[in-house]
Amino acid sequence: MTDTATLLVSHPLPGCALLTLNRPQALNALSAALRGALVQALHTLDADDTVRAVVLTGAGKAFCAGLDLRELGSEGVPTLGGANDPVRALTAFGKPVIAAVNGAAVTGGFELALACDMLLASTEARFADTHARIGVIPGWGLSQKLSRLIGLPRAKELAFSGNFVNADTAERWGLVNRVLSPDALLPAALALAADMASAEPGMLCAYKRLIDEGFDLPMGEAMALEARRSSEWAVAQTPEALARRRDAVQQRGRAQTG
């Protein structure tokens, strides 16, 4: 494990990395130092072929309270999209990232979670958008992503009220994949990451890129993109490799249903 003071980086399972926001005394608020450490860690892990899936969580009782308001008070709102933009780094990250939301995810912390590919939540997790109360326009995608996930009226309710939504409601609304007890959250997230890491090499990055790029397109264009990528991928496959993978999938399926 590497301790950079604000961020912990570990490799608890083969093929998996765990990133832990490590400012529990500040509810893991995104200071400039933490933003920089997270961006650097993501760049390093993206270039590491032994890492194939990542879990992001927070130390202590919170996932992330958003940008550090103490720094905002003395330095003003940082320019988003710069070199130390963790949401941009997560968006560009080529491998699956699972957010293990262990507590409050507020405003910028909410956006950080939404930049991950999927969310698992503890029963202690809560989500809130307080941009309207702080007086800052979102810059990491919350105004656009949330409505696409949970619907326009619900997204506006959260945006305009600043109220918290609990984990059970978030799951019912489709914001999180599932809710687990606090003790079960991290093991479940790591087990899911290990499942993903065991997929065929190269597939995770290619499939993630296809899903993300297609989601941004109209349906007809997305289907055409899939057809083009499928044909390009098929050219590089051999019957022997496909047979080997088919046998492995069948064996795995029998083990899962046994």
Image (spheres, helix red, strand yellow):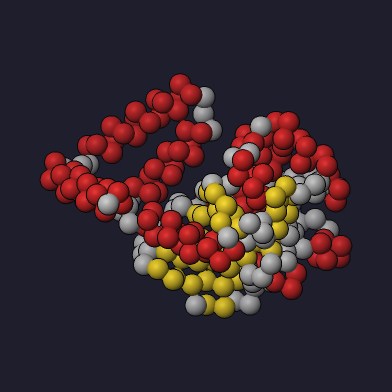
- Residue most extreme to the front: 258
Query: Which residue shows up at 72% across the image and 35% down it?
Result: 154
* Residue closer to the observer: 110 or 169: 169
In percent of width and height, residue 127 lies at 70, 51
So how many labels did they put on this image?
0
Query: Which residue shows up at 81% across the image and 65% down it?
Result: 71
In this rendering, is residue 105 above or below 172? below
In percent of width and height, residue 123 lies at 63, 56
- Residue 53: image quadrant is bottom left
Residue 129 lies left or right of residue 5; in this view the side is right
In this rendering, is residue 208 above or below 153? below
- Residue most extreme to the top: 220
- Residue 25: image quadrant is bottom right
Q: Is residue 251 visible?
A: yes
* Residue closer to the observer: 239 or 255: 255
In percent of width and height, residue 47 lies at 42, 61
Query: Which residue shows up at 76% across the image and 49% down it?
Result: 164
In percent of width and height, residue 2 lies at 52, 77
Q: Is residue 37 visible?
A: no
